[in-house]
Structure formats: structure tokens, C-alpha cells
Image (spheres, rainbow, N blue to C red):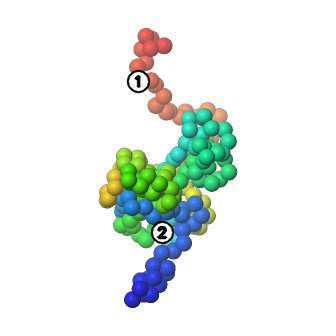
Amino acid sequence: NIWVISIVFLFGNPIPPEGFEYNQSQRQAFYIFLSADINDQSLSEGDWIGAFKIHDETVAYSCETISEECPDINEDGFLTVDASICVGSREWEGPYTPIPVMGTDFNPEFPELCEQTGTCYYLNQGDIPIFNIYESASNAVIPAEPSVMEPFVDLGVYFVSRLTYFTYSMFLESGHNLISFNALRTDNSLNSM
């Protein structure tokens, strides 16, 4: 009976691609995606969705070298202002794929809990996760935009209608091209100059 559960767990949970691994936390939410696509092409078997938290390893540029006070959170050998930490992932299974998203384990009576579980730099209440797609066909990690940005709340369950990545391209002809972008300031009076 315990063997059946173990076998189902081992074979029912595929190994995530590199960078999409995460630690289990007691604090978690689920973001359930109804659809996910890259340039209007639905994700396919082998593609993954990952939730990430961005962390400033330089502590507002006060750290220059890796140390106990300035750890290399994502273990890439560098301190960066935008270290990406995976806090949850799952292989795309089609509509209604739930992505478990982990928060920082915290207990005032046991402050070292997050260090033991490896979740110290995970999401806190109110943080908004960012999402990336691992596209297996190209072996690439692609930033994705959810149709709605929901803040992390422990035990939250969010239904998100779409997760997408879309590239824009413009073809310019030789000679003159007229392309318009909304570049005017909100206050375009002479007083604001």
C-alpha cells in the first residue's frame, strides 16, 4: 500500500527541467491555468510552467562579493539584482493545469524553519510571482505573462484564464517608414518642461 503510493509518486511526478526545481513548503498557493501558449500555439507535452521570485542578491548594491551576509541565492556564482528563484513548477497537462507555488516557511517559535526547508527566499504574503515557460522543443526558458496578476496568499487558489508569450515584429521597407508609438507625456504643457 505504501509501495503503491511511492510508485505513483515516483512515476507520476516527472523530473522538472533545470532551473524549475523547488523545495516543498508548508505555505503554498495554486495558480490554475486554463490555457497557455507561445505565439498563439498551445503548449505541448514536455513543456513546463514555473513560478519564480526575483530577489536582489546585492541588497540594493551594498554587496559586491558572495558572503554569509550576501548569499548567492540562485547559486549561479554571481550576485545580481534580479536573481530568479523557482518557487513552483509543473509540466503542462492541458487546460486546468495547477501550478503549486511555495511561500517562505515561517514560524516565530522556530525561526530557522525556512533554512531547514530551503524556502527562506520564497514568496511572502502579497508577493506576486512571475511565470516562465520551459519549451521542450527549443530547450528554452521563455518569460510569460498571465492574464491576471494575483498576489501570493497562503492556501490561495487562483484561476488564471491565460498564460502567454507573444513576440512582436515589424518589417520595415527600404526608404521612409512611418511607425507611431504613444510617446507623449501625460502632461505635455510648456510648464512641465
Eye-nearest disc, 2 or 1: 2
**Which residue is at 59% across, 40% downward?**
58
The reply, left or right, for residue 157 in relation to residue 91 is: left
Mark 1 crowd level (few <14, some 14–19, many ≥20, 10 Å Cα): few
Mark 2 crowd level (few <14, some 14–19, many ≥20, 10 Å Cα): many
Q: Nearer the viewer, residue 19 or 147?
A: 19
- Please state the horizontal and vertical placement of residue 35, each as a whole percent of the image: 39, 62
Quadrant holding the N terminus = bottom left
> Which of marks 1 and 2 precedes in the sequence?
2
Calculate the distance from the C-alpha at mark 2 to the C-alpha at mark 1: 43 Å
Q: Nearer the viewer, residue 36 or 132?
A: 132
Secondary structure at numbered mark 2: strand
The reply, left or right, for residue 166 in relation to residue 100 is: right
Residue 28 falls in which quadrant of the image? bottom left
Q: Amino acid at mark 1?
A: Thr
Secondary structure at numbered mark 1: loop
**Which residue is at 45% across, 57% downward?**
113
Q: Amino acid at mark 2?
A: Glu
- Please state the horizontal and vertical placement of residue 109, each as a whole percent of the image: 38, 53
- Please state the horizontal and vertical placement of residue 9, each as a whole percent of the image: 45, 79
Is residue 113 visible in the rendered image? The answer is yes
**Which residue is at 56% across, 35% downward?**
60
Mark 2 sits on what residue? 91
**Which residue is at 57% across, 58% downward?**
141
Checking the image for residue 186, the label placed there is 1
| Count of numbered labels shown in the rendering | 2
Residue 31 falls in which quadrant of the image? bottom left
Q: Nearer the viewer, residue 55 or 106?
A: 106
Q: Nearer the viewer, residue 160 or 64?
A: 64
Checking the image for residue 107, the label placed there is none
